Image: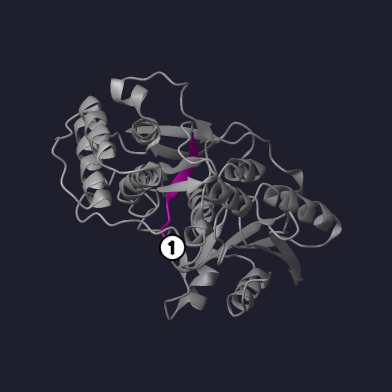
Amino acid sequence: MRKYGVIIGVLIALCITGGGFLYSIEVWPPSQSAAAANFKTPEEKESEYVRFVMEGYDLIQKNYWQKAEDSKLANHFQLSLEKAAATSSAITATDRASTAKMLAAAFDGAEGADAKKNLAVGILQVALYNLAPQGRNQLLSAEEQKEVQNTVNNVNPSTGQAEPTVFSKGMGSTLYISIGRMSPVTVSEFTAILETASSTPYSSIIIDLRGNIGGALDQIPVFLGLFLGANQYAFDLYHQDNFEVIRSPVGKLAALDRYKEVVILTDNMSQSSAEVFSAAAKRFGIATIVGTNTRGWGTVEGTYQIETKIDEKTTYGLMLVYGLTLREDNQPIDGVGVSPDVNTGEKNWQTQLSQHIRSPGLVEAVRQAVSEAPQR
């Protein structure tokens, strides 16, 4: 297992722009709130700003994918405070209690509620941004959390309705299915297409995941169950030195039985949950993977609410990397991606197709599909 360290290095302040990071969100565990107020230090009892930051501290320690030792996390927060406040701390943070004392001293030196609020938000922004993988952990306002949820659910903000994610067409004896992202309705859309095609002569499937930006990871065990059956091992999530086994919750889909061969198309923008599905399909021999290496975005994010309010206009929550997804060889997807069985970047890729695919009709359909943009 390749290890990440908590990135300290040069801390930089986070500028949250209009949701540029939202395109790759994976929400795995349900949004969780911090425990009911049980102040562990006098400083938290006396100051909502200290309490706000220390809630973030506790949520990181409990939910972040990598175990965060108290001494290292305390030092991380000291560096974050010093960056956010643009000054050195007179108190050295070595554990949770001393971190609270350090924060209290910093807030005592900030003049006015706005300055204290901005400092509290800034500390968490910097601390989160610099947790590995850098830039994927964020502090979100209530509005930004709503944007994340809409993105995962593929909801058009102007209509409030979920947009389609699955498109299909016939290519000779091959059923071509393009999936643009993984949303809560993707599996039902996929199933509906297969049921509709049950009276056709299709004997093979192309599942086009090129440009698939990921989305709802909890749909992947369901998706895999259609091929593998109920309660089958689907994949692992790596979280705080443990491998969490994820199993398929549904049984095989009878409408898939007639398809003798399946091909999955990938490219360098197939990411997150699309990569998990591709890796599992490769591991279990569900499909032949054709295309290029996937993007290598192998983190799973969860959202965690901060209960302490420091702003009358909004609340805040943490978006944390909860776990790492793994390839078929049990190495992290992140930074590496999933490699195809047939790499279309190689000169002889078309010749290689016939070595992996038995049906000449499917070989021809794959060649045609690769030459065209994914259907949307």
Viewer-proximal residue among 239 and 294: 239
* Residue 100 appearing in the image: yes
Q: Which residue is painted at 61% across and 41% down in the image?
A: 228
As for residue 299 lying within the magenta part, the answer is: yes
Q: Is residue 295 above or below residue 325?
A: below
As for residue 103 lying within the magenta part, the answer is: no
Magenta residues, start to end: 294-305
Residue 343 location, x and y as percent? 45, 70
Q: Which residue is mark 1?
A: 295
At numbered mark 1, what does the secondary structure look like: helix, strand or loop?
Answer: loop
Q: Quadrant of the C terminus?
A: bottom right
Viewer-proximal residue among 308 and 158: 308
Q: Disc 1 marks which amino acid?
A: Arg
On screen, residue 43 versus residue 342, left or right, reads: left
Viewer-proximal residue among 227 and 179: 179
Q: Quadrant of the N terminus?
A: top left
